[in-house]
Image (cartoon, helix red, strand yellow):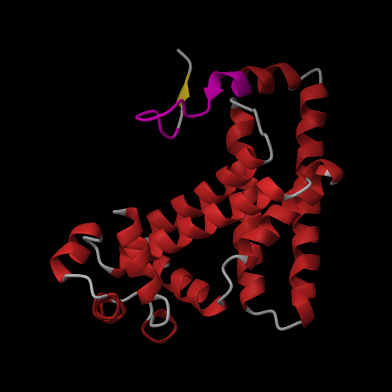
Amino acid sequence: MADVKDKLLDAALPHVPFDGWSEAAFEAAMEDSGLEPALARGICPRGAADLAVAYHKRGDALMCEALEKADLEAMRFRDRIAHAVRLRLEVAQDKELVRRGMTHFALPAYAPEGARLIWETCDAIWNALGDSSRDLNWYTKRATLSGVYSSTVLFWLGDDSEGHADTWAFLDRRIENVMQFEKVKAGVRKNKLFGGVFDKVSEAVRAPGGSGDMPGHVKR
């Protein structure tokens, strides 16, 4: 079924810049792919909305493949994060597909799913970079990177500089903000007054442990 969905997605992509992730794009994809409508609807009950999700997840998969081939050990840690975000944008290729996706996931009915997809992208980045945190840091790392990623996507969509040089400079500045935040956290932990409280709270909050354990839990 995954191959069939990929075929339907590929057929939809040329139509999305003009029709968005809409019913019109989905119907055109069914016609161009030659799939029976009943089969297409069975695979994508929500029509183009399911294809928009599939397009985003395809980008995550391509990013992870590229990260596996990258020489991350030769990079500073902050550069690894920047490289991952840059790869994620580059695999999107067509800005209009991303712009249409942002418009789609800005709709109230799809906004929670859009936020979840961004979180999953950042989770994939941290996992690819070898993050082993299972306490509060698991959440703060993904939350801060979600902010960096979202703001960088918005900047990138409006960037017409050569080679998107302005976007990569913007990304570097945002990651510097994250590094400063991490320094503040480290300072709090070293503080005699607040450090112990912070550590207890951090240890009490646990990362998701698998199916049925989202978005995490507090140890009893």
Q: Residue at x 82, y 22 (%)?
A: 190
Magenta stretch, main secondary structure class:
loop
Count the labels in the image.
0
Specify the quadrant of the image occupied by residue 110: bottom left
- Is 17 placed left or right of 141 in the picture? left
The N terminus, quarter of image: bottom left
Residue at the farthest left position:
38
Identify which residue, 118 or 25, lies in the foreground.
Answer: 25
Q: What residue lies at 65% left-to-right and 54% top-to-bottom?
A: 66
Image point (82%, 40%), residue name: 73
Q: Please tell me whether residue 211 belongs to the stretch shown in magenta.
A: yes
Q: Which residues are magenta?
A: 201-215
Residue 87: percent from left, percent from top:
67, 60
Residue 58: x and y in percent read 48, 58
Report the residue at 62% width, 24% height from top: 202
**Is there any visible trace of residue 206 in the rendered image?**
yes
Q: As drawn, which residue projects farthest toward the top?
A: 220
Could you say which quadrant of the image residue 46 lies in? bottom left
Q: Is residue 150 left or right of residue 80?
A: left
Whether residue 107 is visible to the viewer of this picture, yes or no, is: no
Q: Where is 7 relative to 175, above or below?
A: below
Location of the C terminus (image quadrant) = top left
Q: Is residue 202 left or right of residue 30?
A: right
Instruction: State yes or no: residue 23 in magenta.
Output: no
**Residue 127 x %, y %:** 61, 38
